Image (spheres, rainbow, N blue to C red):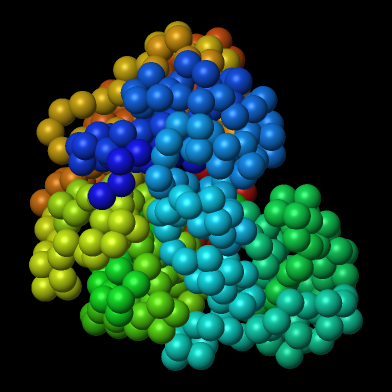
């Protein structure tokens, strides 16, 4: 096993990784920007190293600074968390060249699946159904128009290097396609440094289902069930749960089996997810693969009892998986609500300020993953995620009630601060959600209608 792991991330996921490392007797090194000097993980880790100013490109996206910090601290491995450099094949190769183990899939897998257009091609070759669209990046507005005419509107333009719900533009009218295409390319270049885009048919109402997989790179691949991530606002996930409710009989089993075979076909190693859209007929289509730990991994851990970070470390260290498919026995229902520092009353505008009060909920079967604490200053430099409230219960009705109770207990106050906790409680009360008839369109439809 590794002696020292540098955690190339920040916030709740950095603290989450550090906790499992400590339980395994592995020394940890936290990196921080100037605005995170007194963060929860810098106080928890065995050592902390400054890597730059607040701007991500000069700190958490600065591969050279991170590798230098790892070498200085005597680390033998790097855990990238999610976001930032977690799916960057160049960073994985740099780590390898410097004698550092990258705790994630091989660079070759990251390169193939990180390119969303290439990932569609790989998925199709592995037998996964994909939505009609382009298998290669679209080079001109004329090519975009032809593809859209062939597959039918509405279509969605996606950044090849996108992910996490970003870099997507829906087009419903042929007249708006040229401008949308140009804006999508420009936006992709700003957000990801890569202007390439591809096009596929857009499903107005669908379920977003993802499968958690684990693999050891030696042909052993298993799944830990599916998660429903359909509660989204502008394709940003807000609430996730497992198992996915209301799917047609046998649908979840087929989706999970497809994900396992697809991961095996590319020689996957570590933790990851295969994401799908499911239409009203129960047909499913591959959307993308995420080659990292997911924000919503706590719900899977709650129903399976499997520590996904521990499995990541074991695989990266060459030990292989600690379990087989028959050992995975999910029990009960888990729901996660993302509490963001955003103001729902002002179009979900991110808020920043000093947290004067921060008291997370507790009680039976409640888990809160957070880096927040009283006295912390929330800045606008990074993602607005403040805490993840995850609950477990024997059935979905009780899980919804527990999640509502937990959100109601959360005490967050500060000058200039607003959160989405109250908004999430309203979603939990929505009849469509409670009856498991919700789709990815629920929140945007309600928001547009002023409800």
> Going 73% across and 69% down the picture, which residue do you hit?
197
| Front in this rendered view, residue 374 or 65 | 65
Residue 283 visible within the image: no
Which residue does the image show at 10% across and 67% down from the upper left?
327
Residue 37 or residue 429, whichever sits in front: 37
The total number of labels drawn is 0
In the displayed structure, 312 sits above or below 276; it is above
Q: Is residue 107 visible?
A: yes
- The residue depicted at 40 percent of the width and 65 percent of the height is 273
x then y, percent, for residue 132: 61, 86
**In this rendering, would 406 be left or right of 126?**
left
Return the x and y of residue 54 as percentages of the image width and height.
65, 26
Pick the front one: 366 or 444 = 366
Identify the residue shown where x is 62% and y is 59%. Answer: 90
Q: x%, y% of residue 78?
A: 44, 46
Residue placed most toward the observer, 129 or 348: 129
Quadrant housing residue 209: bottom left
Image location (x, y in percent) of residue 325: 17, 73
Lateral position of residue 427 relative to residue 249, left or right: right
Q: Is residue 170 above or below residue 285?
A: above
């Amino acid at each position: 096993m590794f002696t020292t792991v540098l955690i190339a991330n920040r916030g709740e996921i950095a603290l989450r990784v550090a906790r499992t490392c400590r339980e395994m007797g592995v020394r940890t090194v936290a990196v921080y920007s100037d605005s995170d000097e007194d963060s929860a993980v810098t106080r928890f880790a065995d050592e902390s190293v400054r890597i730059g100013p607040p701007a991500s490109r000069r700190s958490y996206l600065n591969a050279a600074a991170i590798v230098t910090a790892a070498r200085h601290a005597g680390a033998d491995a790097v855990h990238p968390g999610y976001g930032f450099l977690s799916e960057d094949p160049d960073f994985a190769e740099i780590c390898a060249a410097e004698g550092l183990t990258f705790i994630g899939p091989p660079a070759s897998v990251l390169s193939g699946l990180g390119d969303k257009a290439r990932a569609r091609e790989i998925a199709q070759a592995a037998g996964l159904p994909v939505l009609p669209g382009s298998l290669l990046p679209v080079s001109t507005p004329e090519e975009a128009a032809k593809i859209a005419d062939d597959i039918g509107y509405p279509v969605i333009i996606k950044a090849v290097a996108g992910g996490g719900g970003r870099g997507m533009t829906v087009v419903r009218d042929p007249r708006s396609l040229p401008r949308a295409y140009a804006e999508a390319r420009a936006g992709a270049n700003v957000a990801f440094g890569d202007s390439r885009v591809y096009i596929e048919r857009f499903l107005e109402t669908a379920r977003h289902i993802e499968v958690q997989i684990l693999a050891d790179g030696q042909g052993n691949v298993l799944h830990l069930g599916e998660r429903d991530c359909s509660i989204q606002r502008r394709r940003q996930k807000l609430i996730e749960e497992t198992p996915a409710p209301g799917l047609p009989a046998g649908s979840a089993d087929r989706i999970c089996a497809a994900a396992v075979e697809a991961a095996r076909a590319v020689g996957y190693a570590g933790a990851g997810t295969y994401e799908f859209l499911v239409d009203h007929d129960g047909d499913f289509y591959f959307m993308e693969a995420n080659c990292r730990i997911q924000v919503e991994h706590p719900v899977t851990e709650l129903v399976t009892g499997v520590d996904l970070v521990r499995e990541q470390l074991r695989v990266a260290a060459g030990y292989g998986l600690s379990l087989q498919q028959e050992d995975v026995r999910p029990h009960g229902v888990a729901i996660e609500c993302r509490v963001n520092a955003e103001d729902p009353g002002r179009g979900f505008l991110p808020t920043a300020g000093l947290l004067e009060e921060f008291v997370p909920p507790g009680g039976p079967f409640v888990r809160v993953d957070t880096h927040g604490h009283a006295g912390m200053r929330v800045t606008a430099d990074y993602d607005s995620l403040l805490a993840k409230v995850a609950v477990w219960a024997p059935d979905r009705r009780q899980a919804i009630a527990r999640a509502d109770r937990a959100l109601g207990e959360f005490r967050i106050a500060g000058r200039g601060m607003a959160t989405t906790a109250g908004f999430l409680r309203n979603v939990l009360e929505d009849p469509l959600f409670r009856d498991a008839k919700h789709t990815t369109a629920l929140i945007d439809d309600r928001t547009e209608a002023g409800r």
